[in-house]
């Protein structure tokens, strides 16, 4: 799949085709994330280095692995809900979150034409309600599992959309191709299943590590039925070509 050269128009704050007010929110979210994130990472890693015993390092490693699984599952859950519940007119989340998932199914390569802020800012934004309280009130030395878990979780969440974009890019960087080939991040082959009829699985887009398990236990059909039921109350219709579409 080749990306076309149809870049968004140049504007005051970069290339984007949505209201400047959205762009300002995105830029503020990115700046806040890296400001607070640097403080939290410094404290968490500093605490690990200061303690440096086997039990603490084992807890941190376990927390990192759990964060990888949780981030991947969360990416799939949010993705499936945005694809199948509500619409772009849904209050609060319609324009900011559901819209990008719906447009992605209409034009999967559109995100490859977006700059870093457009592709990744939303994921920075969703981390802030967890990151800012953690910086303000968490004593990381007293939480040798929770602090590394939160740090790793936010790293995985923030990289999710970029990883998703790379799965659609014709020629990602060599290092990314290596990560894709070793299934450490979402690979184009794995993600292609989601964009192939019947469009009813492989929603997880961080690494895809949880997709086979969720498919095996029949998680997605249950979630789709739940979305259909909830759809009676919140309105809207699923993304084009999805499992709740015509004939579902
Ligand atoms: Zn989707
Ligand atoms: Zn995709």
Image (spheres, grey):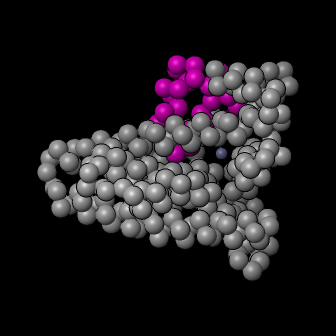
Total number of numbered discs in the rendering: 0
Residue at the location (59% across, 36% down)? 77
Residue at the location (46% across, 39% down)? 70
Residue 129: in magenta span: no
Q: Tell me if residue 96 can be seen.
A: yes
| Image quadrant in which you'd find residue 85 | top right
Left or right, 228 with respect to 176, comes to right
- The front one of 184 and 20 is 20
Ligand 2: image quarter: top right
Quadrant that contains the C terminus:
top right
Residue at the location (17% across, 44% down)? 55
| Image quadrant in which you'd find residue 118 | bottom right
Which residue, as the protein is rendered here, is positioned at the far left?
A: 53
x%, y% of residue 153? 44, 49
Assign the magenta stretch its main secondary structure. loop
Residue at the location (57% across, 67% down)? 30
Residue 198: in magenta span: yes
Which residue, as the protein is rendered here, is positioned at the far front?
A: 137
Q: Which residues are magenta?
A: 195-221
x%, y% of residue 212? 50, 28
x%, y% of residue 107? 77, 49
- The front one of 178 and 244 is 244
Which residue, as the protein is rendered here, is positioned at the far bottom?
A: 12
């Amino acid at each position: 799949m080749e990306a076309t050269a149809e870049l968004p128009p140049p504007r005051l704050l970069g290339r984007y085709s949505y209201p400047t007010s959205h762009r300002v929110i995105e830029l503020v979210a990115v700046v806040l994330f890296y400001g607070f994130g640097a403080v939290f990472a410094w404290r968490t890693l500093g605490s690990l280095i200061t303690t440096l015993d086997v039990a603490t390092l084992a807890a941190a490693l376990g927390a990192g692995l759990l964060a990888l699984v949780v981030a991947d599952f969360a990416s799939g859950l949010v993705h499936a809900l945005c694809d199948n519940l509500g619409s772009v007119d849904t209050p609060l989340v319609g324009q900011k979150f559901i819209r990008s998932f719906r447009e992605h199914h209409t034009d999967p390569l559109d995100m490859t034409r977006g700059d870093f802020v457009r592709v990744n800012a939303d994921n920075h934004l969703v981390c802030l309600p967890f990151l800012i309280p953690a910086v303000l009130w968490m004593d990381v030395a007293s939480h040798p599992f929770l602090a590394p878990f939160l740090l790793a979780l936010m790293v995985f969440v923030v990289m999710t959309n970029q990883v998703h974009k790379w799965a659609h890019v014709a020629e990602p960087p060599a290092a990314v191709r290596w990560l894709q080939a070793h299934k450490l991040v979402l690979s184009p082959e794995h993600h292609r299943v989601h964009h192939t009829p019947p469009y009813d699985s492989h929603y997880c887009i961080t690494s895809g590590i949880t997709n086979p398990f969720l498919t095996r236990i029949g998680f997605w059909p249950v979630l789709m039925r739940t979305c259909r039921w909830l759809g009676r109350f919140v309105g809207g219709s699923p993304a084009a070509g999805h499992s709740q579409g015509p004939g579902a």
